[in-house]
Amino acid sequence: MSDTATLSAKYQISIPKALRTEQQWSAGQEFVFIPKGKGVLLMPVPSLDDLKGQAEDADPSDYRDRKDRY
């Protein structure tokens, strides 16, 4: 895919429809920008439901909380 977009005077970029459709992105979805050299990586922020079950084998017995910080 080689679609391009232009940065507007308000510093906004429209994501091409073909890319939005392929990635199943929708209006109002939240994204994070990760600097990568001279570019940036655009990633959707996952919902808590998307993360559910990611750490099923994790051992919560040694879990640290803010209570044990200075």
Image (cartoon, rainbow, N blue to C red):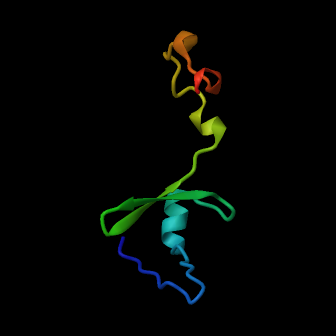
The residue positioned farthest toward the top in the image shown: 61
In this rendering, position of residue 34 left or right of residue 38 = right
Which of the 4 quarters of the picture holds residue 30? bottom right
Residue 68: x and y in percent read 60, 20
Depicted 9 relative to depicted 68: above or below: below
Which of the 4 quarters of the picture holds residue 49? top right
Comparing 1 with 13, the one in front is 13
Depicted 62 relative to depicted 7: above or below: above
| Quadrant in the picture for the C terminus | top right
The residue positioned farthest toward the bottom in the image shown: 9
Which residue lies at the image location 57% right of the left edge and 58% below the top edge? 31
Comparing 27 with 65, the one in front is 65
Residue 53: x and y in percent read 57, 26
Which of the 4 quarters of the picture holds residue 37? bottom left
Depicted 1 relative to depicted 44: above or below: below
In this rendering, position of residue 24 left or right of residue 2 = right
Which residue lies at the image location 53% right of the left edge and 19% below the top edge? 56
The residue positioned farthest toward the left in the image shown: 37
Which residue lies at the image location 53% right of the left edge and 78% below the top edge? 13
